[in-house]
Image (spheres, rainbow, N blue to C red):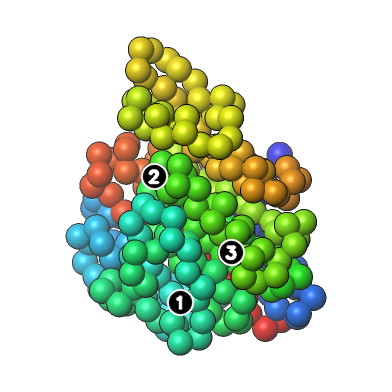
């Protein structure tokens, strides 16, 4: 059994979505994955592969770490696009003119955006994480790839549904052609929330019972991965179109940063996806 499914640990620094690596019908190779915390140059408390420019690490070290990942796939960092993530549900289409935004300087990132997608080759999308849920999307028919950042706020604002909606309404995707991977994030067993969060969960148009375990008065374990899966199914995706990672960022200190475990003083992993000419 592959502990990392639907990813494979291809290097100490990268978990790759293996099922998406085959060439699509437009002769494009999809490169999609999630970084670990290992193999970079950042010093404590960010050791070592921190990819976040907003956590008070040395910018030069972060850029070196990002270049290390980009070079691994022979993709210049100037082809990558990052976002100023605000825990909302804004999804933005990315084109060639956006290449390089946020890649080396945070202030140039796409503003107030938590979801990115493109149908253009040689444009690579990247977001940063340290417990929140990375959502990866792929439509091999329309040659669309996307990624979204879903913390509890983005989840209850249904950013996954927003991505699916934009693809079907603006890009002509068929629901049956959209595939999703829910990546490593904090597990329900490690994520305790209160009634403030649960009130927002209860207001969702999906039954969240399978994602919630009440442990005490006004205290709940919330499985954000399962909640995002339920939202995607309610958005029209079939269960077999969605794969979910069992990896927990909080309980895997040798692999991942965790905002909760590290009490906020930590680095960021990076989700990334893009298409190259095969």
Residue 232: numbered disc: none
Q: Residues within 10 Å of mark 3 (few under 14, many from 20)?
A: some
Residue sitting at x 51%, y 36%: 204
Distance from disc 1 to disc 2, alpha carbons, whole Å, reads 26 Å
Where does label 3 land, which residue? 166
Please indicate whether residue 201 sits to the left or right of residue 238 in the image: left
- Residue found at the far bottom of this picture: 97
Residue sitting at x 51%, y 73%: 93
- Residue 220, image x, y percentages: 41, 22
Give the foreground label among 1 and 2. 2
SS under mark 1: strand
Give the foreground label among 3 and 2. 3
SS under mark 3: helix
Question: Mark 1 vs mark 3: which is more N-terminal?
Answer: 1
Does residue 14 appear in the picture of this structure? no
Question: Mark 1 vs mark 2: which is more N-terminal?
Answer: 1
- Residue 60, image x, y percentages: 25, 73
Distance from disc 3 to disc 2, alpha carbons, whole Å, reads 20 Å
Q: Residues within 10 Å of mark 1 (few under 14, many from 20)?
A: many
- Residue 244, image x, y percentages: 62, 44
- Residue found at the far top of this picture: 217
Give the foreground label among 1 and 3. 3
Residue 144 falls in image quadrant: bottom right
Where does label 2 land, which residue? 153
Q: Which of these two is toward me, 79 or 138?
A: 138
Where does label 1 land, which residue? 80
Q: Residues within 10 Å of mark 2 (few under 14, many from 20)?
A: some
């Amino acid at each position: 059994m592959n502990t990392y499914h639907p990813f494979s640990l291809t290097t100490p620094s990268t978990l790759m979505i293996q099922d998406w690596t085959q060439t699509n019908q437009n002769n494009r190779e999809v490169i999609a994955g999630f970084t670990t915390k290992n193999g970079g140059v950042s010093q404590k408390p960010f050791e070592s592969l921190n990819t976040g420019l907003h956590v008070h690490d040395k910018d030069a070290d972060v850029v070196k770490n990002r270049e290390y990942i980009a070079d691994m796939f022979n993709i210049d960092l100037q082809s990558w696009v990052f976002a100023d993530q605000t825990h909302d549900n804004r999804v933005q289409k990315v084109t060639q003119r956006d290449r390089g935004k946020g890649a080396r300087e945070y202030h140039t990132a796409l503003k107030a955006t938590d979801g990115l997608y493109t149908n253009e080759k040689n444009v690579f999308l990247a977001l940063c994480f340290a417990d929140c849920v990375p959502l990866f999307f792929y439509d091999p028919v329309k040659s669309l790839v996307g990624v979204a950042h879903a913390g509890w706020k983005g989840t209850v604002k249904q950013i996954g549904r927003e991505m699916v909606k934009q693809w079907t309404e603006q890009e002509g995707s068929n629901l049956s052609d959209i595939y999703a991977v829910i990546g490593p994030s904090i597990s329900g067993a490690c994520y305790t929330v209160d009634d403030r969060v649960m009130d927002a969960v209860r207001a969702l148009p999906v039954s969240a019972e399978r994602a919630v375990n009440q442990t005490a008065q006004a205290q709940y374990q919330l499985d954000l991965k399962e909640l995002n899966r339920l939202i995607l199914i309610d958005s029209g995706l079939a269960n077999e179109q969605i794969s979910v990672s069992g990896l927990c960022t909080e309980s895997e200190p040798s692999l991942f940063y965790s905002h909760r475990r590290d009490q906020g003083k930590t680095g960021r992993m990076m989700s990334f996806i893009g298409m190259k000419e095969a």
